[in-house]
Amino acid sequence: MKPMHAAAALTFALAATASAQGTPAPLTSHLPAGALLTLETNGAGPAFDRLTGLIGGVLDSASDLGGGDLEASGAMLRGFSGVLADSVGREGVAGVFTVQGKGGSFTPALLAVARTGDLSTELFSSFIPKKKGARVGAYPFVRSGDLFAGQANGLVYLSSDKALLMSYLGRLSGKAAPTLAASAPYAQATGAAGRVQLGAYLNFSATAKVIRGQFAQFKLPRLLSPAVDALDTLGQVAGGLTTTDAGLNTVSAQVVNAAGKDRPLARLLTHTTDFGVQNVIPADAEAVQATACAPESNAYAARWLTRLDLLEPFGFLTDSQLASHLERAGQYLGSECAQVTLAGGTRAGLDSSDPLAALATTVTYQSVRDRAAAEAHLPEYARSVNEALAGLRGTLKGTLGDLMKGDMAGMDEDGVAAMMAAGSFDQIDELLAGLKMVYAFEGDYLITAFSEEALQAALAGKDAPLAQDPAFQAAGLTLTGSGGWAYQPDPADLSGDDLLGSLPPEMQDTELNETLGPVMDAMAGLVNRYDGMTSQRSVEGNVIIGKANVKYRW
């Protein structure tokens, strides 16, 4: 080879090597296939900077307002942030994998790995015992308590199972074997979701397989068999979040298992519809979660309630005949469902002194296909539920009475427990006493609530619907052929006093409030940076894509 050609070849080789080192293969390209669950980070430094900076700012504000002890916590958090950015902030994966145990069964085990820089390398090396261990290729590891850990070539790794760790290190050393990144379930789900800074992957089908394997030694209980079938049908889910200057974006992708035995569940998950419920929801609603609910969803829920009826200890399901009513309702309800928090719902939820406050702002909308059938059935439905709620109160009071029969005079251990239970039952009894199923119709929609106040508030706002609100229109949500959507406008600001009022009554103490006041003021500032969100759910074959945009001022 001529000298000039040799020099050119050498220059090209060095450039290729430098390029490969600058863009290392993803960690998942060497992890073993068969993960049940993974938590992943990829270029998450900006996310950690924003999150820790936000919390640190709150601690600093609380310190300035009188919480001097919090200043050291803020400094410690910032130091920890540097370590995060220099390790999992680069890239990291923690996963639960299946390993073969005794008798051919499969059990879960942990495997975690992260890229490290100079700062994190030094820190992690101090945690790994300095003793003789083992090595796979260029990768050493030692036993540390119940874990096996090591560090080499810019990686730190640990596992709860020695064979699992050696399997991973073998792949790192060039051994050809199936990898997570190349496995079809992982590749399809994560490919549909796309890259995120902080992510997760769940393989429900593989988890179901492990559960079936655990039960292989004896017959799977009849009640659990449908649950495992449903879990298998859920398939795989991947997704996560990415922070931006304006807030954060989330994405999820669910690949429904087309071969799953729970066919009704697969149909429910992939159902879509054209939404019109926004035309009857009040424009001043504080939160809306709309879902494409297939008419058969009621019958599906009824089958599960029937399975659970014998196990329900208070008899509410039997007394209310809820399963039967749900199945009948499915004959006239349509494909639109919406859970709505009306105006004032946020502040109502902070009122710890009134457990019914939030119910006064919560309603459900469902489209109706057969108005006559609905009007014929609903009086019986509501009466049955309300009578069952009254019966549940009596059952709980009887349970409390049996508990109180113990000797409380000496305030022994059982007596103290009984008194604590009495307080809890009083709160539950108060809640049940205020529950009453009520309903009304608005156009082609059924509105239900457990508070007359909430129902009337929903009806009063029908003349100014959400569909005509400029902010809702500007959100640009897809309302036709959709799997669902959510909308929350910029909420009203809260104060530190509002958050103090959310504490349990036993914590409403003047002296304690003076201590917590600065912290609550800082927390209110943190909450008030949130400026609303929108989300969208779409369906493509057996893949469900969910995307959300959260507005937040870091």
Image (cartoon, rainbow, N blue to C red):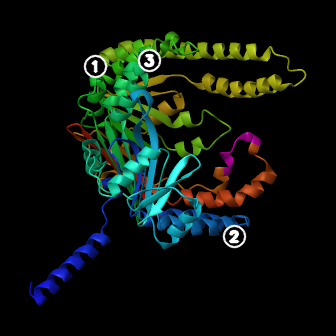
> Which mark is drawn over residue 313?
none
Identify the residue at image location x=44%, y=48%. Answer: 111
> Which mark is drawn over residue 64?
2
Residue under numbered circle 1: 370
Give the Cα distance between marks 2 and 3. 53 Å
Q: Magenta stretch?
A: 500-506
> Which mark is drawn over residue 305?
3
Residue 3 sits above or below residue 169 on the image? below
Q: Quadrant of residue 552?
A: bottom left
| Amino acid type at mark 3 | Leu
Taking the image as shown, residue 407 lies to the left or right of residue 349, namely right
Residue 63 sits above or below residue 211 on the image? below
Q: Is residue 503 magenta?
A: yes
Residue 366 seen: no
Identify the residue at image location x=58%, y=46%. Answer: 347
Q: Quadrant of residue 314?
A: top right
Q: Nearer the viewer, residue 308 or 231?
A: 231
Taking the image as shown, residue 134 lies to the left or right of residue 413, namely left
Give the Cα distance between marks 3 and 1. 25 Å
Residue 343 pos. (x, y %)? 49, 44
Identify the residue at image location x=50%, y=16%. Answer: 385
Give the Cα distance between marks 1 and 2. 62 Å
Q: Is residue 122 magenta?
A: no
Q: Nearer the viewer, residue 279 or 245?
A: 245
Residue 231 seen: yes
Q: Residues within 10 Å of mark 2 (few under 14, many from 20)?
A: some
Q: Which element is circle 2 on?
A: helix
Name the N-terminal-most of marks 1 and 2.
2
Q: Indicate which label's residue lies in the foreground, 2 or 3.
A: 3
Taking the image as shown, residue 360 lies to the left or right of residue 372, namely right
| Amino acid type at mark 1 | Asp
Q: Which element is circle 1 on?
A: loop
